[in-house]
C-alpha cells in the first residue's frame, strides 16, 4: 500500500532508468542514490523504461534479465516499493498512447535540436530507428502522464526536460479550456550533487559506461569487495598531491573524478573533501576511497544477489507497481482524450 500522505503531496517526481544490465557506480551516484533520498519527502514514481530500451536492438532474454537486475538494484539500494511506485514502463499502455498524441503536438524542428540523438545516431543517421529519433517524445509522455512536477536527471537529459515543457505548453495552448487552462504541469529538472556525471576510472574525460570495452573503467554494482578494491587501486591518477581548491583540478580530470566520487559517497561537498585530503597523495587517498566504496556498495550487491534468486518476487513488485501507476495514468489519459475530442 503506497503512503497516502505522500500521494496527496503537491509535488511529484517521475524518473526512469533503462534496463541495460551491468549497472555501475555512475548509475548509483547519478540517479539511484538521489531517488532513495527523495522518496520519503515527495511522492515518487520510478520506472524501468523498457520501451526506451528497444530504441536500439535488444536480445529478448537479456532485456528480461536486465529488467530483473535493475529492479533488484534499485530495491537493494533502498527504494521501498511500499512507499514509492516501481514498475516497468511497457506494463502501462498509457505511456505509448500519450506518446502518439504528443507526436502530433511536437514539432520536427524541436526534435532536430536534440543533441543526444545526433550523438547516438552518429554518421549512420539514416539507419537510425524512428523510435530513437522520437525517444524524447516518449520521455515527455512518461513525465506528463503522471503530472510530475520534478524530474531527477543527469545534465545530459536536461534538454529532454525542456522539450517536455515545450510539449506541455503546446498541448495546453491547443486543447485546454476554461476549466483546464493549464492541464499539464511544466516539470522542473533536478540535478543533484557532485557526482551527477561520474567518469571512467581509466579516462577522466569520458563518462563511466557499461559499453566501455574495459571492465576496469567502471565499478559495477555487482562487483565483489576485491574487485572494487582492485579497480580503485588501478584507477588512473597523476603524480601530484591533492590541491586545496577545486580550481586547481581544472587540468586534472582523473583526480577530479575520484574526489567527486568520494564526496558523493560520503554526502559532503568537494570542498569538504579537498580540505580533508589537501596535500596528500593518491597513495593515502585511494585506501580511504576503497573503504568508503566497499562500505557503501557491498551491502547493495549482496542484497541484489538475494533478490535475483527469486525473480518471481521481483515480477510481483513490478506488477503491483504497474497497477498503482495505472490508477494515476488512466484518468489522465482519459481526460486528454476528452480535451482532444475523441469519442471514449
Image (spheres, rainbow, N blue to C red):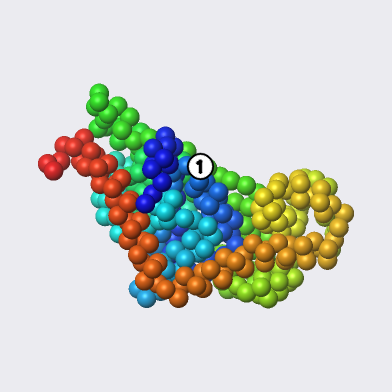
In this rendering, the count of numbered labels is 1
Compared to 173, does 151 lie above or below? below
Residue that lies at the very extreme toward the left in this rendered image:
343
In x, y percent, where is residue 234?
73, 72
Q: Residue at x 30, y 59 (%)?
A: 91
In x, y percent, where is residue 284?
83, 63
Compared to 95, does 162 lie above or below? above
Q: Residue at x 35, y 65 (%)?
A: 316
Q: Residue at x 66, y 73 (%)?
A: 225
Image quarter of residue 90: bottom left
Q: Nearer the viewer, residue 194 or 86?
A: 86
Q: Please give the residue where the numbered disc 1 appears in the rendered image.
A: 41
**Does residue 218 show up?**
no
Q: Nearer the viewer, residue 102 or 324?
A: 324
Q: Residue at x 40, y 67 (%)?
A: 314
Decide if residue 45 is on the left or right side of residue 237.
Answer: left
In x, y percent, where is residue 182?
33, 29
| Quadrant assignment for the C terminus | top left
Image quarter of residue 28: bottom right
Compared to 181, does 115 lie above or below? below
Image quarter of residue 256: bottom right
Decide if residue 95 is on the left or right side of residue 220.
Answer: left
In x, y percent, where is residue 158?
50, 45
Amino acid at each position: 500500500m503506497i503512503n497516502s500522505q505522500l500521494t496527496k503531496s503537491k509535488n511529484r517526481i517521475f524518473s526512469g532508468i533503462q534496463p541495460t544490465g551491468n549497472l555501475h557506480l555512475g548509475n548509483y551516484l547519478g540517479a539511484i542514490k538521489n531517488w532513495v533520498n527523495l522518496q520519503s519527502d515527495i511522492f515518487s514514481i520510478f520506472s524501468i523504461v523498457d520501451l526506451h530500451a528497444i530504441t536500439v536492438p535488444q536480445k529478448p532474454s537479456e532485456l528480461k534479465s536486465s529488467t530483473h537486475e535493475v529492479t533488484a538494484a534499485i530495491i537493494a539500494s533502498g527504494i521501498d516499493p511500499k512507499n514509492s511506485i516501481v514498475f516497468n514502463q511497457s506494463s502501462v499502455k498509457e505511456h505509448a498512447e500519450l506518446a502518439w498524441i504528443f507526436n502530433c503536438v511536437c514539432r520536427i524542428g524541436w526534435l532536430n535540436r536534440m543533441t543526444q540523438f545526433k550523438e547516438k545516431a552518429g554518421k549512420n543517421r539514416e539507419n537510425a530507428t524512428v523510435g530513437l529519433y522520437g525517444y524524447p517524445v516518449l520521455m515527455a509522455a512518461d513525465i506528463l502522464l503522471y503530472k510530475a512536477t520534478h524530474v531527477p536527471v543527469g545534465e545530459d537529459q536536461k534538454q529532454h526536460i525542456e522539450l517536455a515543457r515545450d510539449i506541455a505548453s503546446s498541448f495546453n495552448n491547443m486543447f485546454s479550456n476554461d476549466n483546464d487552462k493549464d492541464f499539464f504541469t511544466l516539470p522542473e529538472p533536478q540535478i543533484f550533487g557532485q557526482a551527477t556525471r561520474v567518469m571512467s576510472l581509466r579516462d577522466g574525460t569520458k563518462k563511466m559506461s557499461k559499453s566501455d570495452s574495459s571492465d576496469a573503467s567502471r565499478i559495477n554494482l555487482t562487483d565483489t569487495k576485491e574487485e572494487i578494491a582492485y579497480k580503485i587501486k588501478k584507477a588512473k591518477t597523476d603524480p601530484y598531491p591533492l590541491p586545496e581548491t577545486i580550481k586547481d583540478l581544472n587540468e586534472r580530470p582523473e583526480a577530479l573524478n575520484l574526489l567527486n566520487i568520494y564526496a558523493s559517497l560520503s554526502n559532503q561537498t568537494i570542498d569538504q573533501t579537498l580540505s580533508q585530503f589537501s596535500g596528500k597523495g593518491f597513495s593515502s587517498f585511494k585506501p580511504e576511497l576503497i573503504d568508503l566504496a566497499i562500505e557503501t556498495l557491498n551491502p547493495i550487491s549482496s542484497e541484489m544477489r538475494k533478490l535475483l534468486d527469486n525473480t518471481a518476487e521481483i515480477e510481483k513488485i513490478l506488477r503491483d507497481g504497474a497497477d498503482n501507476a495505472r490508477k494515476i495514468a488512466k484518468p489522465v489519459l482519459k481526460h486528454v482524450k476528452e480535451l482532444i475530442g475523441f469519442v471514449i
